[in-house]
Image (spheres, rainbow, N blue to C red):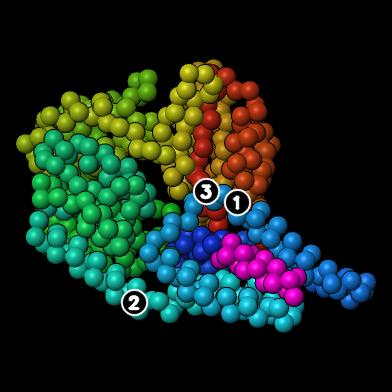
Amino acid sequence: MIGTILFIAALGYFGWVRSKTHLAYFQQEEYDAPRYLRAMLDVRLYDVQASAALIVLWGLKAITGLGIFYPFLAALVLAGIAWRESRYRFKKPLVMTERATRMLGLARAGGAVLVALSGFGLIVALIAMQVIPFALMAANAVLQPMQQRINDRFVREATDKLAELRPVTIGITGSFGKTTVKHMLAELLGIAGPVFYSRGSINTVLGLTRHIRQRLQPSHKYFIAEMGAYGIGSIQRLCDFAQPTYGIITAVGHAHAERFGSLANTAQAKSELAAHICAHGEKVIVTERVAELAPFKALQTANPSKFVVVGEGEGCDVRILSRALKGADWEIALRFPSGAEHRFILPLLGEHNVMNLALTVALIDAIAPEVTARLPMITPTVSQVPHRLQKKEAGKGPLILDDAYNSNEEGFLNAMRVMRDVANQKGGRAVLVTPGVAELGEEHDRVHKALGTEAGALCDVVYAVNPSRIPSFTQAAKGARAEVIELPTLNDAMKRVTAMGLTDADVVLYENDLPDLLEEKRFL
């Protein structure tokens, strides 16, 4: 009897820990059940160790006749596995929001019934262990109507607040660069008045809703809304919510191609912001490459006065006249629609930031032209955006280039070239740590082969994290200049970098940092 009680208690502890493990991964998949089912197979999020241990112990019990010890041994094994699992540290920890708390509580309540019945036999215990992720998905489905009502109420509150305070709203979208441009714009536009913007990479209706409800103040003159797209219609929903009167489209590329299926679909999705501005707003700022894409070209033809095109071509409204890297600073000359020319100093690494600055000041010139001439006095102090080719220098040791939040081919290539240039200037080695890029769909192998070829030529050492998902990258990187070392996790790579004995002359680039779901397979 005591053994059975201990076994049930140990199984309950196991379920308590395992349910949080699954919830952490379920949250990373944004509570999307079909995606999570695929992740369960890809990352091996199904129980093996505890189930196998119980089956083996049951077999030994039958063979040896030592049945009296079975529940005690089984309880010890389950408790040990659960304790070890509880010490696992996610790169993206579980956030116990009200929604997550409700879901976990309901799933555990359902699982408790099976746990209580587990004293009746091995089969019930095995079912109790394997059913945990399905209990979470079922709890999410049961709670969804209530969650939708809560979300709708919060969105209405945010919409009402925007309607009451009426800040000038600026939407920013693009396959890449939108977060950097948002931070840059928030810093520079502050010269014209108080600016409110979402922190980090918040770019969904619910994410913006939370920030608006909690942080938007009557004193804010401008509101910058980063807009992420998860398919056709995503940007339109954000426009319906935020009602931007100005917009910036930073780029259209293969980032997140897995979501869109084709570059044409990506362009169509991003053009929803331009279409909204053409119908309801003032100006939309685009690069000349974006302006050439079919949906943008059609919108510009129909609404020429609504577009400001930025680039190096003669026909650009805001033209990049020159760029030169002097030390760690860019010197950039721009010509504006008024005919005025201004020179800017930008202390950010990466050639892509030249266009980011040009888009930013083009928007400011469109929205508050009276401050354009003062911008060159501010750009030399623009802050680095965290984790986007951010320089991290210590008193001793290598220069760290933190590009952990980059997720596109162009930015990846740019970052490697910056690393090589800085390493050459310092006379040191160039070390790359990367798990590759995610959500590329059919472009996965092509992009990683191109990135690997460049990495092999530019780097001295390449640490490929979780190489099984990027074989085209590792194969392309081998045989050239770089030594390629394959490691399962970012933590393993960081330990190897530390053990290299790098000096002040060396440069280490951390390029992208994928979530736990994409970094390693578990053995639960």
Task: Report the residue at 53% width, 68% height from top.
Answer: 36
Where does label 1 land, which residue? 88
Where does label 2 land, which residue? 146
Labels 3 and 2: the sequence-earlier one = 3
Q: Which amino acid is tagged 2?
A: Met
SS for callout 3: loop
Judged by depth in the image, the label closer to the viewer, 3 or 1, is: 1
Is residue 2 or residue 506 the one in the foreground?
2
Q: Which amino acid is tagged 3?
A: Lys
The quadrant where residue 132 appears: bottom right
Pinpoint residue 325: horizontal percent, then vertical percent: 35, 24
Pinpoint residue 135: horizontal percent, then vertical percent: 54, 75
Q: Is residue 2 above or below residue 434?
A: below
Task: Report the residue at 53% width, 30% height from top.
Answer: 508
Labels 1 and 2: the sequence-earlier one = 1
Q: Is residue 349 visible?
A: yes
* Residue 132 falls left or right of residue 380: right
Instruction: Please identify the residue farthest to the front as the structure is shown.
Output: 2
Count residues near mark 2 (Cα–Cα under 10 Å), then give few for <14, some for 14-19, many for 20+: few
SS for callout 1: loop
Q: Which amino acid is tagged 1?
A: Tyr
Residue 91's disc is 3
Q: Does 311 lie within the magenta span?
A: no
Judged by depth in the image, the label closer to the viewer, 3 or 2, is: 2
Q: Is residue 398 above or below residue 110?
A: above
Which residues make up the magenta segment? 1-19
